[in-house]
Image (tube, rainbow, N blue to C red):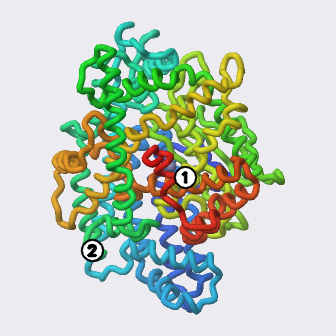
Amino acid sequence: MSDTHATNPLLQDWNTPYGLPPFDQVKAEHFVPAFEVALPAHLAEIDAIAAQSATPTFANTLAAFDESGRLNNRISLLFENLTASETSPALQVAEVELAPKLAAHKNAMYLHAGLFARIDALHAKRVDLDLDPVQLRLLERVHLDFVRAGANLPPQSRARYSAVMERLAALSTQFTQNVLADESGFALTLEDEAALAGLPAFLRASAQAAAQQRGLPEGSHVVTLSPSLAEPFLTFSDRRDLREAVWRGRVARGAHAGSHDNRPVAAEIMALRQEQAQLHGYATYADYQLIDRMAGKPEAVSALLGKVWEPAKAKAEEDRVALTEMARSLGQPTPIAAWDWRYLAEKVRQARYDLDDAELKPYFGLENMIGAMFDCAQRLFGISFVEQHGVALHHPEARLWEVRSRENALIGLFIGDNFARASKRSGAWMHVFRSQSGHNGGTLPIVINNNNFAKAVAEPALLSFDDVRTLFHEFGHGLHGLLSQVKYERLAGTQVLQDYVELPSQIFENWAEEEVVLKRHARHFQTGEAIPSSLLEKLKRARRFDQAWATIMYAGPALIDMALHSLPNGSTVDLDAFEAQQCELLGIPQDIGQRHYLSHFQHLFAGSDYAAGYYVYMWAEVLDADAYDAFIEAGDPFQPAIAERLQRHIYSSGNKQDPALAFRAFRGRDPKVEPMLAKRGLIA
Ligand SMILES: [Zn+2]
C-alpha cells in the first residue's frame, strides 16, 4: 500500500461506533484513489472464484460471489449516499470521473466469462443440486442478473455492449446534475407584502428560511423549486402571475438550451437503451426491462394503467366544473390553467369540507410524527428506536437511532435526514450504508431515510399531511431494510423486484391515517392538545377529494414512460415532439399536466431502475391497498396475527421467494385490484 493509501480512511478498518463510515475523516478526494484500490481488489476476488479447479458448487461459486467485494461495496454505498444527501462541487467532479469507471467495473464482473460459465453450469442442473429454496432463489436471481447484464452475449458484441453501458452511466450522471443545477439556480424572490398574499404563516416561515440559506438580507422571502416549498406555494399563493412563474420553473427544469439541457442527453440515453435491447434480442427496451418485474410484460402494465386512465379523466371533468365555478366566484380568469388547479382545489376543499391545510399543520410537528412512526413500528413489530448523540454523521442535521428488537437486541441503525438543503437531491428516498446479511456471522443494517422538508425559522418544523405520508412512506422502506432476515445480501432487504419494492413503503402510509395513531401523536405544537375529532373527521372526508387530479398527474407520466420505452429499436427520439404527441394522444388535460416532464424525469434517466417502470408505484398500490384491507377486515390496525404475517412474509423476507408467493402467503390469495380503485375514488 502506498503512503496515500495508508492514510486514506476509506481503505482502513472502520473502528467507529457501529462500524459507521468515518464521516468526519472522509473527504471527496479520497474516493477516486480508494476505488482505484477497491475495484481491482474486487475483480481479483472474482478471478479467484472463476479460476478454482474444483467443480462449481453452490458454496464455492454462488455463496462466494455473494460474499465478495466487501471493500468496494462499503465505499460504493458511502459514495452513493454522499452524492445524493450531501454533495459538493468536489464530489460532483469525482462522480463524473467515476461513473464510467464504476460502470466498467460492473461490466467486468457481469461479463466475466469464467465466472458466468460456473454460474451457468450450476443453473443448468439446478433442480438436481439439492438446494434449499433460498439457495435456489439466489442461483436463479444471480443467473438472471448476469444474463440481463449481457453475460450470454456472443463475444463479438461484448465490447460494444460495455461501451454502451459505460456511456449510459456517464449520461445518467449528467442528467441528474443538470436537474440539480436548474433547481438550485431557481429562486423567486417575493419582493413585498403583495407578493406574499395568501401564504399561511408556515409557508412564510419556510420561504424566509430559504432566503436565509441563500444569504439574503433579514426578512427576505424566496420560493425555490423544492417540492416542500413550491407545492404549497402553488396551493396557497393568491398571486396568479407568481404561481405561473413557479409552475413554469418546475416544468422547464432540464429544458433550457445550453450546457444543462437534458433533452439531447435523454435522446442519447434512449438510442443507447434501444441498442441495448437489440443486443439482448428484445424488440423494445420495455420488453427487456419487464422480464425482471412482477408484471412480466408491457401489456400487463397497459392493462393496469388502462383501468384508471379514462375513469380518472371522467372524474376530473366533474372536479373541473367545481374549480371553474370557484375561479369565477374569485374573479379569476377561466378557463383555468395548470398553475390554478392546486390553488382552486384548495379553495374548493376549504369550502366543501371546511378543511384548511394551515389549520392542520400545527398538529403535524415533525418530531411528533417521527414519534408516531416509531410507535407504529413498535406496536406492529415490537421494535424500538433509541436516539444516539455525539456520533459523527454526514451532516449535522442527520440523526441516529439504535433499533432494538422485542428482546432488546440491537438489530440495526436508523439515520433520519429530514430537511431540504441545496446540497441534497430533491425528493425523498431510503438507502443503506450497509445492508443486512449473514456475512461475518451476521451484519446489521445501517439504513437512512432522506426527506426534503422545509425548515422553519424560529419554529419547529410543521408538516403538511402529504409530508406526513412521505415520512411514513420512506420509513416503510426503512423497515424493509431494518427487519430483513436474509442470509444472502443479493436477496436481502429492499433488493426485490422493482414493482414489489413499493409495497412495504406504501402500505405503511396507511398507519399515518389511522385515527388511533393521530389521536395519540398529532398534537398541537404549542398547546400539546390532541387533534380535535372534528378536524380528523374533516381530514378523512376530504382525503378522496381531487384524487382524479393526483391519478392523472401520476398515470400520464407512467403511460408516457411506457410509450417511450416501447418505441421499436432504432427509433430516433425528439423529446419535445414525442412528449407533445403523447399528451395529445392520451388527452392529458392541459390544466392538470404531469408530475414529471421528460427533461427532468429522474426516475427514467438518472438510472435504469425505473425506466419503463414509473408504473411500479401503482402496481404496488394494488398490492398494498389489498394487503391493508386485511387489517381493516380484522377491525384492528395492529391486529397481532396479521402483523406477524406481514413481518414474516413481507418486511423480513427480502427476495427469498417469488413476490407473488410472498403476497399469497400473507393474504391467503392473489391480490385484487378493486381496493386500489376504490381508494382513488374510481369505483364506488
Ligand atoms: Zn418509495
User: At label 2, which amino acid type do we have?
Assistant: Leu
Residue 417's x, y, as percent? 57, 38
Mark 2, residue position: 279
Residue 363's x, y, as percent? 63, 25
Residue 220's x, y, as percent? 42, 12
- Residue 76 seen by the camera: no
Question: Which secondary structure lies at badge 1?
Answer: helix
The disc at residue 88 is: none
Q: Quadrant of the N terminus?
A: bottom right
User: At label 1, which amino acid type do we have?
Assistant: Ala
The residue depicted at 51 percent of the width and 43 percent of the height is 27
Nearest to the observer: residue 181 or residue 37: 181
The disc at residue 625 is: 1
Q: Does residue 86 sit above or below 224 in this rendering? A: below
Mark 2: give few (<14), some (14-19) or many (20+) Cα within 10 Å.
Answer: some
Question: Which secondary structure lies at badge 2?
Answer: helix
